[in-house]
Image (tube, rainbow, N blue to C red):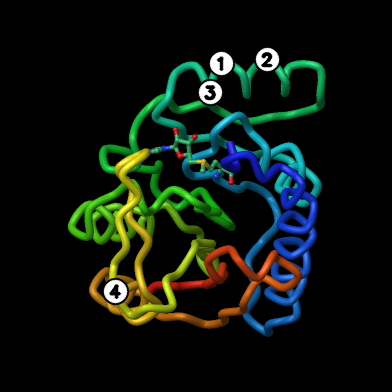
Amino acid sequence: MLGGLSSISDVDLKGSQRFLNSIYQLVECPGKERALDGGAGIGRITQGFLMKNFPVVDLVEQDRHFLEEAKKSLKPTNHRGQFFNIGLQKFTPENCVYDIMWVQWVLGHLTDEDLISFLRRCKLGLKPRGLIVLKENLTSSGEVEMDNTDSSVTRPHALVVELIKKAGLRIIKEQKQQRFPSDLYEVRMFAIQPV
Ligand SMILES: C[S@@+](CC[C@H](N)C(=O)[O-])C[C@H]1O[C@@H](n2cnc3c(N)ncnc32)[C@H](O)[C@@H]1O
């Protein structure tokens, strides 16, 4: 799931927890009831992080096998939430239900247009004060870089910011993931809210 880099998962989850904690220091912070894990894979983030913060976590994942694996490993836990087997490019959240929508390491599989329209639909799924967190690799070349093994792209910071703006959202906080191996792409978290 992490391209053979599962040892970074722990560092990643701790970095996410710190970022989430900092969001809850904000004056207008979101509630703590329901989260969405976008591009959830086998439920690594749901189980390792989101469930510790939210009593209900829904998962969206395009790959049926990954979602089945997530269901299986979450079954013996106290997980509450729904499983949506659909691509983010088609997913429309229920209106006004999520405090946090966590979308990590999946946007490189969407075209710019699909990413913008996905984020526009996500806005409607947020509760008042709710927010979306994007956590993604970024290129340092300033260019979009293609990964031919899985046909995904990695975007530069400026493009991610531009797409967020085009979707009618604003960045309220962003932070680089610390303690990742230096030969990996920079990873950044963006907390974004409707303008
Ligand atoms: C690198 S994994 C990351 C999984 C998870 N976010 C994590 O960090 O552990 C990318 C995941 O995105 C899923 N994915 C790829 N394209 C997708 C799409 N269009 N919509 C939803 N999920 C997608 C893949 O099946 C895979 O589970």
Q: As displayed, is residue 169 above or below residue 185?
A: below
C-alpha separation, residue under disc 2 versus residue under disc 1:
6 Å
Q: Say left or right for 93 vs 6.
A: left
Give the image quarter of residue 55.
top right
Nearest to the eye among marks 4 and 3: give it: 4
Viewer-side residue, 182 vs 83: 182
Q: Are marks 2 and 1 in contact (CB under 8 Å)?
A: yes
C-alpha separation, residue under disc 3 versus residue under disc 1:
5 Å
Q: Earlier in the sequence, mark 4 or mark 3?
A: 3
The residue labelled by disc 3 is: 66
Q: Residue at x 70, y 62 (%)?
A: 16
Say which amino acid is labelled 3: Phe
Graded by Cα atoms within 10 Å as few (under 14), some (14 to 19) or many (20 or more), the crowding at tag 4 reads some
Q: As displayed, is residue 192 above or below residue 103?
A: below
Mark number for residue 72? 2
Say which amino acid is labelled 1: Glu
Q: Residue at x 72, y 23 (%)?
A: 74
Could you tell me residue 54's position as x and y percent?
73, 47
Could you tell me residue 117's position as x and y percent?
23, 56
The residue labelled by disc 4 is: 143
C-alpha separation, residue under disc 4 versus residue under disc 3:
30 Å
Is the residue at mark 4 in contact range of ligand 1, meaning its CB lies under 8 Å from it? no
* Element marked by disc 2: helix
The residue labelled by disc 1 is: 68
Mark number for residue 26? none
Q: Earlier in the sequence, mark 2 or mark 3?
A: 3
